[in-house]
Image (tube, rainbow, N blue to C red):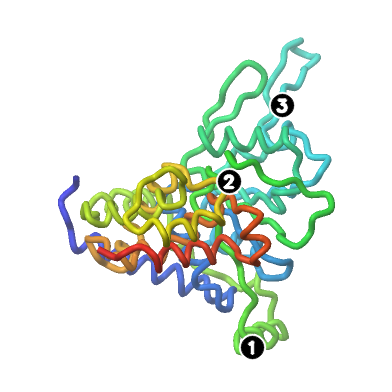
Amino acid sequence: MANFNAQDLDQCKEIANLCREEAKKRIIGQTDITDGILTALIAGGHVLLEGVPGLAKTLTVKTFSDITGLDFKRIQFTPDLLPADLIGTMIYEQNTAKFSIRKGPVFTNLVLADEINRAPAKVQSALLEAMAEKQVTIGDKTHKLPSPFFVLATQNPIEQEGTYNLPEAELDRFLLKLTVPYPTAEEEFQIVKNSISSDPEEIPVKKILTEKKIADMQTALQSVTCDEKIIEYIISLVSVTRSGIQANNSEGREDILRYISFGASPRAGIALQKCARITAMLDGRSFVLPDDVKKMAHAVLRHRLVLSYEAAADGLTADDIITKILAFLPVP
């Protein structure tokens, strides 16, 4: 464990605040989305953004690409998309009578996978390798992707025609799933008012984060400690979603389990621990509080729970179940 350096953590907090201020120039509200993407960038994880059209999901991703200065590519997912359109392919050159590799748009630092649930299984499989291993296979050769590499994917939850459900294995590879809400009346007033004078995409933002600063923040994260009691709390949050695990309050737990067909994987516990530490770091602290875990629980767990028919019948969402779990478990 690296030695705690208060100055390093203060700098991380300052950088986070600067990123938030720059994002506010283009995006009104959505502070939780901004913080979630920033957390994923530091954690080196991928983000799934879910919301109805027109909530500035794409604008948010573009804004972060400008704030970070990372190489950025957008891929519009469609039902006729092929894996070669994503990762690249082998091209035969008549002059040399040899095959050469033409790399696809996934060879970049920041990928916007727009409407990811419109792509068929073969494309999802190619993207899964890139997300999980940070490499792609073209022909008989494997190629490493640039570092850092992040996928920020968007999907529309209300349209079902021409869409494909994401495989559970791919969903589990997303560090966070962030739900983008409608703006409040005050925020929407400001959005409409600002649109009169300027296009949000044309508003300049400063480059705050760089590859080096992201790496420095990842190094500073090693100074943030997580007490064993907090780790036990995280494990309890994850394991309570699985059947066959012993629990003290079996009656309350059974009320939760009847709404869950499949619980969260061990990867959820690792993600929750890391995100809680980043939350503490961005607040200038060298230790994790239970509130840090609670703050990130919904974003980490909501896409890792497979709900039962009973949950659908009772009109409950994954967020409702997670809220029940947080209320059910004692806080250390």
**Mark 3 Cα shell of 10 Å, populated few (<14), some (14-19), many (≥20):** some
Q: Nearer the viewer, mark 1 or mark 3?
A: 1
Looking at the rendered structure, the secondary structure element under dot 2 is helix
Q: Kindly report which numbered mark, 2 or 3, lies closer to the viewer in this rendering.
A: 2
> Is residue 213 in view from this perspective?
no
Cα separation between marks 1 and 3: 48 Å
Disc number lying in front (1 or 2): 2
Q: Is residue 31 left or right of residue 51?
A: left
Query: Which residue was labeled with disc 2?
Result: 171
In the rendered view, tell whether residue 219 sits above or below residue 325. above
Label 1 sits on residue: 185
Check disc 3 and report the residue beneath it: 89
Check the image and name the residue furthest to the left: 3
Q: Which mark is residue 160?
A: none
Instruction: Look at label 3 and name its amino acid.
Output: Thr
Q: Secondary structure at mark 1?
A: helix
| Location of residue 7 by image quarter | bottom left
Q: What residue appears at the point 77 percent right and 17 percent down from the top-left corner?
A: 93
